[in-house]
Amino acid sequence: MADISVKLGALELPSPVMAASGTFGFGLEYRDVLDYNKLGAIVTKGVSLKPREGNPMPRIVETPCGMLNSIGLQNPGVESFVGDLLPQVKGLGVPIIVNVFGETVEEYVRVAEMIQSTGAVAGVELNVSCPNVKCGGIHFGANPEMLHEVTKAVREVTDLHLMVKLSPEAAVIEAVSNAAEQAGADSLSAINTIRGMSINIETRKPRIATTTGGLSGPALKPLAVRMVWEASRSVSIPVVGIGGISTAMDAIEFIIAGASAVQVGTANYTNPRACEEIADGIAVYLEERDIPKLSDIVGSVEVYEDYTLK
Amino acid sequence: MADISVKLGALELPSPVMAASGTFGFGLEYRDVLDYNKLGAIVTKGVSLKPREGNPMPRIVETPCGMLNSIGLQNPGVESFVGDLLPQVKGLGVPIIVNVFGETVEEYVRVAEMIQSTGAVAGVELNVSCPNVKCGGIHFGANPEMLHEVTKAVREVTDLHLMVKLSPEAAVIEAVSNAAEQAGADSLSAINTIRGMSINIETRKPRIATTTGGLSGPALKPLAVRMVWEASRSVSIPVVGIGGISTAMDAIEFIIAGASAVQVGTANYTNPRACEEIADGIAVYLEERDIPKLSDIVGSVEVYEDYTLK
Amino acid sequence: MGVVLEASEIVKNYEISNGFYILEVFSPDIARSSAPGQFIMINLSHLHNDPLLPRAYSMARRTTETLVFIYRVVGRGTGLLSEKRPGDRVHVWGPLGNGFTITDRKAVLIGGGTGAAPLIDLSEEMSRRGMDHTLVCGGRTAGDLKFMDEFSDVVKYSAYTEDGSLGEKGFVTDYISNGNVGAEAAIYSCGPMGMLRRVSELAAEKGAECQISIETPMACGLGTCLGCAVPKRNSKGYYKACTDGPVFDSKEVVI
Amino acid sequence: MGVVLEASEIVKNYEISNGFYILEVFSPDIARSSAPGQFIMINLSHLHNDPLLPRAYSMARRTTETLVFIYRVVGRGTGLLSEKRPGDRVHVWGPLGNGFTITDRKAVLIGGGTGAAPLIDLSEEMSRRGMDHTLVCGGRTAGDLKFMDEFSDVVKYSAYTEDGSLGEKGFVTDYISNGNVGAEAAIYSCGPMGMLRRVSELAAEKGAECQISIETPMACGLGTCLGCAVPKRNSKGYYKACTDGPVFDSKEVVI
Ligand SMILES: Cc1cc2nc3c(=O)[nH]c(=O)nc-3n(C[C@H](O)[C@H](O)[C@H](O)COP(=O)(O)OP(=O)(O)OC[C@H]3O[C@@H](n4cnc5c(N)ncnc54)[C@H](O)[C@@H]3O)c2cc1C
Ligand SMILES: Cc1cc2nc3c(=O)[nH]c(=O)nc-3n(C[C@H](O)[C@H](O)[C@H](O)COP(=O)(O)OP(=O)(O)OC[C@H]3O[C@@H](n4cnc5c(N)ncnc54)[C@H](O)[C@@H]3O)c2cc1C
Ligand SMILES: Cc1cc2nc3c(=O)[nH]c(=O)nc-3n(C[C@H](O)[C@H](O)[C@H](O)COP(=O)(O)O)c2cc1C
Ligand SMILES: Cc1cc2nc3c(=O)[nH]c(=O)nc-3n(C[C@H](O)[C@H](O)[C@H](O)COP(=O)(O)O)c2cc1C
Ligand code: FES
Ligand code: FES
């Protein structure tokens, strides 16, 4: 098998395929069905300072080639995560990246400090883009100044790998990408879900209790590839591609667009062995084409220069 | 059959189902397969001041539940449209709405003037959101001030129904909606395509010659429903829903979200009889539920108030 | 052996009546390791992503080598499932969920529509254990219960139909309200939400134990999506229908 | 009668060899009103939207009541098509496009892979008109041309295979370069782009007339999406492959 290990800055990962936040629990749920050696990292469900119950039902609904979710960042809080879950998750032997979420800069900082102090985690991913929570989330990611502020504040309290997860709802991807890089992010991940809505035409009620929810799945892929391309051209730190990846071909498309690694989300639901099959498929792709290292094709897209529109 | 005629301001349409710009040519192509009496209006392919050849190939590619296109607004120019095509199109007996596009405010105005002077057209739809052309398009629709300027300028030269087509790439839908309303638009249509990208992993070239193209089709539907809901809550002029509508159920979803009428785009490709089937299905829906008029359900979505996030 | 994920061959897939289908898939590992009330997820196709999500189905019967399901064509997912033929393969994973907890009490099994499925399995298990029990199933008309004939070799049941075309005329919940169930009973129930609400109420009235199997939207079936939340009755927060359920004590949840 | 849109029943759909399939659909109206080189669009399913777009297929044969196609499973669209069974219905519309223009010149028909399809239809039509003509088809190996046997009652052809396992060893274009075709000929060709480029070059060299049938991405087949643009050679702008083509004079287009 080809060597598919990757480096994201100083962080070495055995595989370019990570499980995306919110779609892999805290990492324990897939043990029966998945070869964890094929995982580059597990990105945990979002962890906040205090426990959160999450949103009322219905929380998910299927849409064409996608789904909407509004889970409301249900999680046991950082204390319980560090005390109860992390000891088990650690044992999996897979790098752990903790997805961190707060409603204020201080909350982000305090969660990051607690994660840092465990010594058992490889990195922190800042969820600045979750569209589901009243105050916080959405605004950090949509606004370059606020994104800079929260990234910088977290950077000051942790030397763990710091990944900033971009929101597709930022008006200009380049601006938020630059803001995160300048504030000290080690990598960007793109993209989080984009807000959508679905209505039951019998009851005339939204199919998501919070009216709108975040769209994920293959439907999102063309947007995500475009944003990864835009982000990777505007920063020099690595970009991690996310959005509708369900096959090795999808992953390679993101890598050629500019992603140094990928995260697989919704596909874990439709095929619990998705991450493993994608990692294997990437290795086969490289082997069949005699490409020595994955990094050889990162960002290798050859645009038709004459026709490229800005 | 239930009466499904609708009024958009002063404009009376026999049906709420219009064929969307760029997916129905100039109206002549579907005569063999479609009952034109079921159409509310035909929105023409975008018309510009000068003829445009369009973009190089490849121009379209299939994506999950959607497609990307970058046609480059190929059209024969307003003179040829008015002289050669309009006389034929007029004969169809269906209200014609001309989709108008320019690279400057002046171009929009001159095209609108020529359309106005024909006396054979029901309305003008401003394409301020087409993502495919170097200068122009995208900026008008993304920026409330510029949108206001172009809408106002066109308003001054025409008393035809003036529909402004929103871009999903505007950061805040409410702001552009308000800008168009205040500038004198008679209605809004939402949404145009959103930019995406797809790469051939064998050649490593983009599958669209211009690198990115506009995403349309069912994949887009949840975003479009959300934006129609947002737009319709922020203005008092009617909103026309567009994006991934391929069944009567889809159309009704948009109507309940706040659309007074709908446009059907990509579905004309996958089912040339889509507009007819959707119009019939809407009538059946109303009849089966004893709903006297379509307007009774426009915007009738009942959000779970307690949980609605802003 | 935990959760098994495999591409299973379809052995049978045919319509019984009124859009009700019987599906049988070859899956000895899941058949061996599962219990009544558990379910599996079925991915509809690897060739397309629409409809996207897998669907949950409760076992109606587990033979040594196969799993038997009852489904009704109600949407696109079941529409596509009904097009599959013997020999086709579908990706399945299971067994999932907790299943019913069999207690010593007098067992009354109340099923509505395809909700009969896990109760057929439970009834067969109770018979295997020599437990006396009653299975009552409801539908709108006789045709809606015709699938029960396929299981007549292993289970006996009493029918309730809304139009009286089979068994008693009325709702299946009438069986409880008509005085057949008392405080000594344990009710095991599965069916539409409205029915489960009524069963839970009646059980509370009678003082009977009551386990209900709940259908919620599910994306993963494995406890990671948090889409299947069921509100707890006695405290804040939610259970997960896929791992804490789908069977719950009716007193523990708000439905 | 113009374009017909209908839900047509599949009469036959089976693999011949190497992933090449024969598909036959019942569609008397299209069969009656179409001509060699025209095509239809097939919508893959009304139950799912992925893959989304319809696919274009050229008629290989038109009987009084049916249309016969040759396709090769190369992606998800053809993967799903290959799962259809006789009795299933697919939505089709056609006939579309211009078709070949039959001239009086000595006719040489050059097909590559499934590109043989419209040439089989054309050959049958020429025979019907009593026109002398030559059909030459190319493939990688004998197995890639096995589908031709299905049409041996109506057409005769010479084969070229890359591995020499059937007919001449080499590329089908060798037939032209080997001196069989002169300025008196009219070439009619369909196949992969690379092959069509070579055929066009050779035709220009020999001074022969040349009509090529081009495959481009297509969303509508009816002239509205403008996705099927083919650059004009002698002026600016584009033809539409679906309505101006798919058959073009090789001197008129840039491919
Ligand atoms: C634990 C469990 C066991 C189940 N067992 C059975 C069974 O034995 N027989 C059977 O026929 N059905 C069963 N269902 C329901 C089944 O999973 C499908 O949801 C149902 O068949 C819907 O059919 P569809 O896919 O055609 O509907 P679609 O209209 O295509 O579904 C649209 C969406 O709504 C969701 N949905 C629709 N109905 C339900 C429902 N009742 N419960 C949860 N989600 C729903 C679907 O999952 C899908 O995401 C079970 C559900 C659960 C959660
Ligand atoms: C006028 C015309 C006639 C055709 N006749 C035949 C025929 O007789 N037999 C046959 O096997 N195929 C024919 N094709 C190609 C056919 O339409 C499909 O594109 C092909 O079968 C691809 O298979 P797929 O859907 O499995 O590929 P997928 O990988 O699922 O297709 C992906 C996308 O690429 C497009 N695409 C892929 N290959 C081609 C191609 N060669 N030309 C145009 N678009 C392509 C598809 O339309 C689709 O949008 C014809 C195409 C055209 C335009
Ligand atoms: C049910 C669900 C829950 C999610 N929870 C989180 C979360 O807690 N934090 C986060 O940053 N992203 C979360 N996401 C977003 C995913 O990590 C990912 O960015 C998105 O789903 C797009 O990728 P996909 O199309 O592969 O799913 C969630 C997604 C889903 C579907
Ligand atoms: C091939 C193609 C060409 C289009 N051309 C135009 C255009 O000229 N002007 C315009 O305003 N919108 C154009 N659109 C956008 C559609 O009118 C519509 O807004 C969009 O496709 C979303 O709707 P749908 O999902 O129903 O297709 C085009 C769309 C497609 C797919
Ligand atoms: S179905 Fe995903 S957590 Fe229960
Ligand atoms: S295929 Fe749509 S214009 Fe030719």
Image (tube, coloured by chain):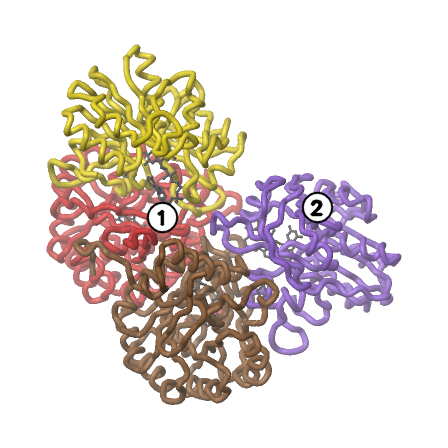
Chain colours: A brown, B red, C purple, D yellow
Q: Name the one closer to the observer, D29 or A248.
A: A248
Residue farthest toward the top in the current orientation of the protein: D130
Label 2 marks which chain's residue? C
Please say if D185 is above or below A166: above
Query: Where in the figure is residue B143, as x and y percent of width and height?
Result: 23, 66
Residue D118 at least partly seen: no
Please say if A35 is above or below C157: below
Q: Residue at x 25, y 31 (%)?
A: D245
Quarter of the rendered image showing ligand 1: bottom right
- Alpha-carbon span between mark 2 and mark 1: 44 Å
Residue C140 bears which disc, if any? 2
- Image quarter of the C terminus of chain B: bottom left
Q: Name the one closer to the observer, B113 or A70.
A: A70
Query: Where in the figure is residue B99, as x and y percent of width and height?
Result: 23, 48
Name the residue tied to disc 1: B62
Q: How many labels does the image show?
A: 2
Q: Which amino acid does label 1 sit on?
A: Glu
Q: Quadrant of residue A109?
A: bottom left
Q: Which amino acid does label 2 sit on?
A: Arg
Few, some or many residues within 10 Å of mark 1 (<14, 14–19, 20+): many
The answer to whether dots 2 and 1 both sit on one chain is: no
For residue B112, side relative to residue C86 (left or right) = left
Q: Name the one closer to the observer, D219 or B272.
A: D219
